[in-house]
Amino acid sequence: MTNGRRKGANLEREISNMIMDALGIEDVKRDIEQYRAGLHGDIIGVDGWCIECKRYANGVTYKADWWEQVLLAAEACGDQPVLIWKYDRQPINCLVKMSSICSDYAGLDYVAQVDFNTWLMLVRESWA
């Protein structure tokens, strides 16, 4: 495994553990199928959500192709997309559709950048 892939896999494991701890659910884990077949998220086990994770050394915000990747995967599996990314010495960030926050935005292409704890709140709300 290259160093970049190792960093990505480590973030996926870290995020999986954080989700299990915060939401009290089990069996959140990396989706190994992501490497064998397209249109898969990186993490499985969070009902209703398609999760894509990115880990890089330097940067400020997400890249458009990352968002496109999770949109395609989410559409294929019928879940809400979330892009989770982290740069070195930066907090974890999440990108979601505005419709995940407010149904008034359904069908529109607006997005919102939120912190990880806010995304966890959105997950809880989507399950209520």
Image (spheres, rainbow, N blue to C red):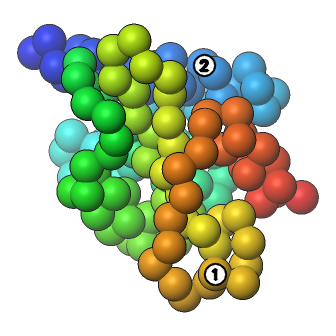
Q: Position of residue 113 (x, y in %)?
A: 53, 50
Q: Does 95 sit left or right of 85 as displayed?
A: right
Q: Does 13 sit left or right of 126 as displayed?
A: left
| Vertical comparison of 73 with 16: above or below | below
**Closer to the eye: label 2 or 1:** 1
Task: Give the structural element (helix, strand or loop) at label 1.
Answer: helix
Q: Does 26 sit left or right of 29 as displayed?
A: right
The front one of 93 and 4 is 93
Q: Position of residue 103 (x, y in %)?
A: 73, 79
Residue that extends furthest to the right in the rendered view of this protein: 128
The front one of 51 and 58 is 58
- The residue under the point 73% across, 72% down is 102
Classify 10 Å Cα crowding around label 2: few (below 14), some (14-19), many (20 and above). Answer: some
Disc 2: which residue? 17
The front one of 45 and 118 is 118
Gap in angstroms between the C-alphas marked 2 and 1: 31 Å
Task: Give the structural element (helix, strand or loop) at label 2.
Answer: helix
Quadrant in which the N terminus appears: top left
- The residue under the point 52% across, 84% down is 108
